[in-house]
Image (cartoon, rainbow, N blue to C red):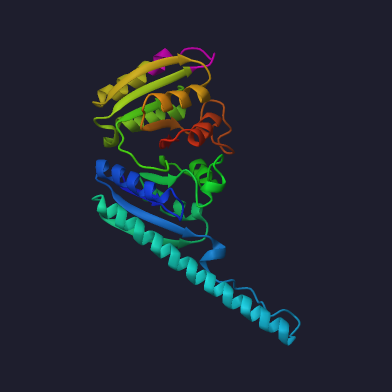
Amino acid sequence: MTNKILALVDGSAYSESVCHHTAWIAGRLNATVEVMHVLGRREGAATKQDLSGSLKLGARSALLEELATADEQRARLAQAKGRAILEDAKTILEANGTGPVVARLRKGDILDAVQEIEPDLRAIVIGKRGEGADFAAGHLGSNLERIVRASKVPVFVASRAFRPIGKVLVAFDGSASARRAIERMAQSAVFENLEITVLYVDNGHGPIGARMDEAIIALKAAGLAATARVVRGEPDELLQSIVASEGFDLLVMGAYGHSRIRSLIIGSTTTAMVQAVKIPVLLYR
């Protein structure tokens, strides 16, 4: 099994939390870390198109030359900002005892950059929202949604602030991705010595006792401290309430439930929980 964690950082308020959570995960897995900042195509390089136009009037030519110079300057500043973000991230990771840490500045589309190295990854850590977080508090970051839809490895969605993780809530619905989450948890040192609650919210679809029993048996067989719990109601409302009132530090979910159109959307309960809770969310495919 590969043992590298990818941390995706930008200029948002979530980047420091991404680094601290990555350090926590890497420490428990004894994993290496690659921290990456991706410059969009527009900010990563100066525009290469011909700005001279068909008319060669002096004022027009001077203006277009000035625009080209400004474009090149923006590209240089974006690259300098990217290098500074990576330097800060690497410093935080190393201060947490993480090593080795490789910093990588990429240009282009973030999903292309992630998919290029995904075969070498064990997990991806990303902030809930990007640099526009304060202006889009009710929305997930578009890059996060794209990465969750496309990634085959677990995606750890960091909350705005880091705190040590001791209590874990697993939202279990018996779906393939939920069972995969249990399987991966049982194989991972991340969950050793943590208090794990496997929760099924029955909203009228009926009990899944056999699958719950299998999940608890699998976790306990791996030496993990796990208990089962069943409540009745709507998953979105109850999960949010339980997370907020009972002091859980991490929510684990399958990325999709039973009836989601996997190629188009993240499961609706998953999306709602990532938006609503103030703790990190670990998503499994």
Is 209 inside the magenta-drawn segment? yes
- Tell me which residue sits at (49%, 71%) in the image: 76
- Tell me which residue sits at (43%, 27%) in the image: 244
Residue in front for this viewpoint, 203 or 163: 163
Q: Does residue 150 appear in the picture of this structure? A: yes
- Looking at the image, the residue that sits furthest to the bottom is 58
* Residue 204 x, y percent position in the rendering: 54, 13
* Residue 223 x, y percent position in the rendering: 23, 26
* Residue 120 x, y percent position in the rendering: 36, 50
Q: Is residue 156 above or below residue 232?
A: below
Q: Which residues are magenta?
A: 202-212
Q: Is residue 182 above or below residue 41?
A: above
* Residue 251 x, y percent position in the rendering: 40, 31
Q: Is residue 126 above or below residue 54?
A: above
To which quarter of the image does residue 87 belong?
Answer: bottom left
Q: Does residue 175 appear in the picture of this structure? A: no
Left or right: residue 79 compared with residue 62: left
Is 201 inside the magenta-drawn segment? no
- Tell me which residue sits at (58%, 72%) in the image: 71
Residue in front for this viewpoint, 219 or 238: 238
- Screen quadrant of the C terminus: top left
- Screen quadrant of the N terminus: top left
To which quarter of the image does residue 65 belong?
Answer: bottom right
Count every numbered label the image shows and give the total.
0
